[in-house]
Image (tube, rainbow, N blue to C red):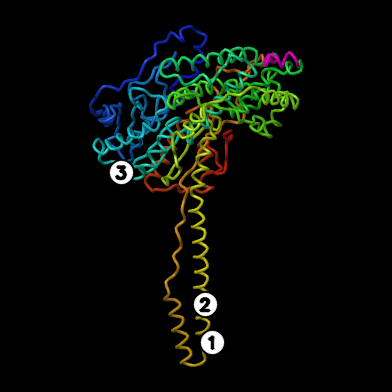
């Protein structure tokens, strides 16, 4: 799950016979390299292969201003086989996160090196392949960190960070090797189990099969090993792209034609616009209702209502969401030995948020449209998978949320590939693990405050007794009591603990859709610079993340107050409320 998958280009390439004719290649490690230093910048670059795994690696150290903090980058999910516009990596692609926004960047190595940070990265290839190899990548990362002790011996702090499908790698490493981890950065991450994300991704295909194309098998078609499984996944994606192509031309205005038997028996159901089904599919699966070009709010002559704007946003988002779901789903299915998607127990009516049902009521064709579509879903055949496969998928990436290292997560509030609810779910899990520590602190703080009050009262009582003493003997005794009260050691205030985790959400502007004179939205323009897309952040937001991680690695904690966070958010286009929550995960 990574921007460099070039999913938008893949979707554009569909419809061509070249798709299945594309040669399928397997990534191989980069050839051994050597260290060299740039005479102008002073940046030393070392590139070779890891001694045990053979995976390619690269270090970049700014020798003129190195501050001792090394950032170890982990790239996201990569398919093992090629498709139009994508070839599996054969070496280190990037040293930091990329930017897929209006001003694309491969990485931010230049900016971070200028700050004095060291950079390290590796190609997450195992047994010559990529795919969903998260657990297998942890030993590779350990090799990289160990190697840094030789390549950059002046390193004092390790920041372990990564994006998208590398989230589990970073989390598992931080939990297994806390002594090698000083701070953790998770960017647009799969921060919890991948099956929670894939269940929604597979729902997209199932729901489209019900309301648009019954030939779609979706995630039920996954699991074959090697190129055959890859082609099966691309074939399913091709069916989805065909639907999206038609809807991009007519905005889903025609009435429903599927399920054919229901439409034939109930003409009123066939009168529901296809865009209403598309909107429902987006809401049930958790697809953001804002996209690169659609703000979900503004209107025009052809987009007469905000809910229709949101529908076009889902249309713009769903292609890459489906591509990610089917390609990552195939990688997971291949790893566990077969299909894992099962919706036999899913009650889709409960997945429609009541607020969304009201907010987008018109776009959903009113209560009758909502009830009609949900009623059909309740009657349709479901997809089942072997219980063993379901359990294996749920057991992937065994993150325990027990890390106490400072952890900063950065996600777009409308990420179309990895739902931002992944970030919120991780923070909730970390806070739940931290709750007993917080409770113990509050109990200790209460005891401390009581002890302080008791000591102060004892001193006050003894002081008053000295003043009331009438005789020399009485005064002497009272003074002795006072001295004894003061001599007793003052209670020690307990140290306030911290969950050491914070989520940063890049926010999108309120209104940004641009309309042509005809009333059609401009879907080819620059679009929003923040808050949308996957790994699409401003340079200022990326630098701010790096500086936070460096400071946290140095101090060992995240010292954030609601007041300071509000100021920070306003300065960088980040949510300024620590309690802000994006769209929650559906599973």
How far separated are the C-alphas under marks 2 and 3?
Answer: 50 Å
Element class at badge 3:
loop
What x and y, as percent, mark residue 120?
A: 32, 32
Q: Earlier in the sequence, mark 3 or mark 1?
A: 3
Residue ID for mark 2: 460
- What range is drawn magenta here? 255-265
Residue 578 pos. (x, y %): 54, 44
Can I make out residue 363 in this image?
Answer: no
Q: Secondary structure at mark 2?
A: helix
Q: Residues within 10 Å of mark 2 (few under 14, many from 20)?
A: some
* Residue of label 1: 468
- Residue 262: in magenta span: yes
Q: Residue at x 46, y 87 (%)?
A: 477
Point out the tag, 1 or 2, that comes first from the N-terminus.
2
Hey, which residue is sitting farthest top in the picture? Answer: 17
The residues tagged by marks 1 and 2 sit, at their Cα atoms, a distance apart of 12 Å
In 3D space, how far apart are the residues under numbered discs 3 and 1 (Cα atoms)? Answer: 62 Å
Q: Which residue is mark 3?
A: 156
Q: What residue is at 33 percent from the left and 22 percent from the top?
A: 128
**Do residues under tags 3 and 1 come within 8 Å of each other at their CB atoms?**
no
Label 1 packing within 10 angstroms: few (<14), some (14-19), many (20+): few
């Amino acid at each position: 799950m990574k921007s460099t998958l070039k999913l938008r280009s893949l979707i554009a390439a569909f419809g061509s016979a070249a798709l299945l004719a594309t040669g399928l290649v397997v990534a191989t490690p980069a050839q051994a390299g050597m260290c060299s230093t740039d005479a102008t910048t002073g940046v030393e670059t070392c590139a070779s292969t890891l001694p045990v795994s053979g995976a390619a690696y690269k270090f970049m150290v700014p020798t003129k201003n190195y501050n001792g903090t090394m950032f170890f980058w982990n790239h996201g999910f990569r398919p093992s086989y090629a498709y139009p516009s994508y070839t599996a990596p054969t070496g280190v692609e990037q040293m930091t996160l990329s930017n897929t926004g209006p001003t694309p960047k491969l990485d931010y190595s230049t900016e971070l090196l200028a700050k004095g940070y060291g950079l390290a990265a590796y190609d997450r290839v195992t047994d010559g392949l990529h795919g969903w190899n998260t657990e297998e990548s942890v030993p590779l990362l350990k090799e990289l960190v160990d190697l840094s002790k030789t390549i950059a011996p002046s390193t004092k702090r390790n920041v372990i960070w990564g994006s998208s499908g590398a989230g589990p790698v970073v989390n598992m490493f931080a939990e297994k090797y806390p002594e090698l981890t000083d701070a953790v950065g998770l960017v647009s991450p799969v921060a919890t189990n991948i099956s929670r994300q894939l269940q929604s991704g597979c729902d997209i295909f199932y729901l489209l099969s019900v309301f648009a194309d019954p030939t779609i098998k979706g995630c039920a078609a996954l699991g074959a090993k090697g190129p055959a499984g890859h082609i099966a996944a691309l074939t399913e994606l091709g069916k989805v792209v065909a639907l999206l192509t038609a809807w991009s031309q007519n905005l889903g205005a025609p009435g429903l034609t599927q399920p054919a038997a229901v439409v034939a028996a109930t003409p009123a159901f066939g009168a529901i616009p296809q865009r209403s089904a598309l909107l429902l599919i987006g809401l049930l699966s958790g697809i953001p209702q804002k996209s690169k070009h659609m703000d979900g709010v503004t209107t025009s002559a052809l987009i007469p209502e905000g809910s229709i704007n949101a529908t076009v946003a889902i249309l713009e988002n769903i292609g890459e969401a489906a591509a990610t779901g089917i390609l990552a789903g195939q990688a997971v299915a291949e790893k566990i030995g077969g299909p894992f998607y099962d919706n036999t127990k899913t009650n889709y009516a409960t997945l429609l948020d009541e607020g969304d049902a009201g907010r987008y009521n018109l776009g959903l064709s009113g209560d009758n449209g909502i009830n009609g579509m949900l009623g059909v879903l309740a009657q349709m055949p479901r997809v089942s998978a072997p219980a063993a496969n379901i359990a294996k998928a749920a057991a992937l990436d065994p993150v325990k949320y027990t890390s106490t290292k400072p952890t900063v997560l950065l996600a777009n509030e409308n990420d179309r590939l990895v739902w931002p609810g992944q970030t919120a779910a991780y923070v909730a899990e970390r806070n739940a693990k931290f709750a007993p520590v917080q409770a113990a602190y509050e109990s200790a703080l209460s005891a401390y405050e009581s002890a302080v009050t008791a000591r102060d009262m004892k001193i006050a009582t003894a002081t008053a007794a000295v003043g009331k003493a009438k005789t020399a003997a009485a005064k002497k005794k009272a003074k002795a009591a006072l001295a004894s009260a003061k001599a007793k050691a003052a209670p020690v205030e307990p140290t306030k603990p911290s969950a050491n985790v914070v989520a940063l959400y890049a926010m999108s502007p309120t209104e940004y859709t641009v309309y042509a004179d005809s009333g059609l939205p401009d879907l080819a323009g620059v679009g929003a610079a923040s808050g949308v897309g996957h790994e699409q952040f401003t340079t200022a937001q990326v630098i701010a993340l790096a500086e936070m991680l460096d400071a946290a690695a140095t101090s060992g904690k995240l010292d954030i107050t609601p007041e300071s966070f509000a100021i920070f958010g306003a300065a960088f286009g980040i949510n300024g409320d620590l309690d802000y929550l994006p769209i929650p995960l559906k599973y």
